[in-house]
Amino acid sequence: MTASTSGESDHPHFLLTAAGQRLAARGTAATFVDPHAAAAALRAGTAPAVVGALPFDLADPAALTVPEHFGDVPASAGGAAAELPTLTQTAQHPAPAEHVDRVRRAIALIDDSDLQKVVLARAVDFEADAPLDPLAVAAALEQRDLEGNAFAVDLAAAGDAHRGRWLVGSSPEILVGRMGNTVFCHPFAGTATSPEGLLDSEKDREEHAYVVDEIASALAPLCAELDVPAAPSVTRAGPVWHLGTKIEGRLADPATSALDLALALHPTPAVCGFPRRTAARAIADIEGERGFYAGAVGWTAANGDGHWRVSIRCAELDGARLRAYAGGGIVGASDPQAELAETRNKLRTVLGPFRLTETARS
């Protein structure tokens, strides 16, 4: 833990609008790069709340803070979100053709090893004609989202390399929430541009089953009761539809906090794959480092209650630069071109407020 003397700021360094709440944090009393240390501080009663972002790889530094002020905030006054700068696409990581090749490589690994599912992502870079305001981007995403989901997290708590960078997005996926002794998750896996046929898709049902089974296995030792529906339902998330399963349980130990639960679950097969270690190695080999994409954003209070969302449908902002991310789950039956199209459809969420889509290039 690192103490801070930054004092109160007029602007939040954390904003999460989800589950009918709009929560913001201002001022920084302390920071954590180790999420397990943050969880220990909550248990010890030395942190009244912890907010921020977890990286995809928990060996990397987290961006967690103990805020000086944390609570509900009203919706932005004035109705419409502020006009956003104009973006120009500058790069793709990797180029679309290479992403297709990476998907083929992943399918070959699935055929030749114990790997059953792996999530591969790509990114697209943009340059704005003026500095980007992370909170304005989050407000625009909130207004566009059917459920009003949006987040903005200042990543400076992760260290000097992240100073000036923000993670901003609109995630439909609940990693885990806790309210009293009740635990809830709503994992998504399996994606289409329309709901028709999604429940009947063998490929998407297989992809989804890995996620649900792994989450249930992780929660079972922590819960006295656990309700896992036998079949998923179809949920809309902006421009795409997902298979989703609402999981609910009752904690065996009320001392288990929402952050403890997030650390027990993350990364799920929805953003990593199955088996987890094999998939993580494949991601490191094929894709490289992800940073905070496919991590988690959220909060936990001193009483253990909290809410953490998977950091997808998001972008990293740094001054006038924006890097947007999207990925998809690969199984043996995946079609490489369809997987590329899925990433383009998912990018529409974070690029929507800019009235922009990815420009197709080689």
Image (cartoon, grey):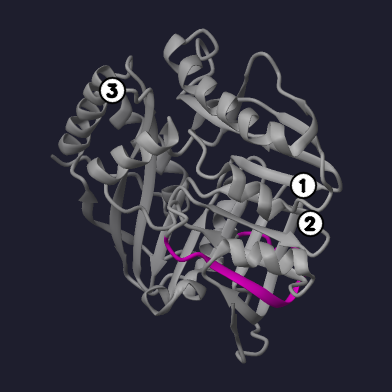
Q: Mark 3 points at which residue?
A: 113
Q: Which mark is residue 178?
A: 1
Q: Residue at the spot x=44%, y=36% of the render?
A: 276
N-terminal label among 2 and 1 = 1
Residue that carries the numbered disc 2 in the rendered image: 304
Q: In which quarter of the image is the C terminus?
A: top left
The one of 189 and 213 positioned closer to us in this rendering: 213
Q: How far apart are marks 2 and 1 (CA)?
A: 7 Å
Closer to the camera in the image, 257 or 94: 257
Is 344 on the left-hand or right-hand side of 249? left
Residue at disc 3, secondary structure: loop
Q: Which residue is drawn at 27% across and 50% down?
A: 288
Q: In which quarter of the image is residue 235?
A: top right
C-alpha gap between disc 3 and disc 2 = 40 Å
Q: Is mark 1 on a helix, strand or loop?
A: strand
Label annotation for residue 343: none
Region in magenta: 60-80
The amino acid sitting under disc 2 is Gly
Viewer-nearest of discs 1 and 3: 3
Q: Can residue 197 be found in the magenta stretch?
A: no
Residue 3, given in percent of the width and then of the height, sits at 61, 85
Q: Is residue 176 above or below residue 108?
A: below
Tell which of 14 and 332 is nearer to you: 332
Q: Quadrant of the N terminus?
A: bottom right
Amino acid under label 1? Arg
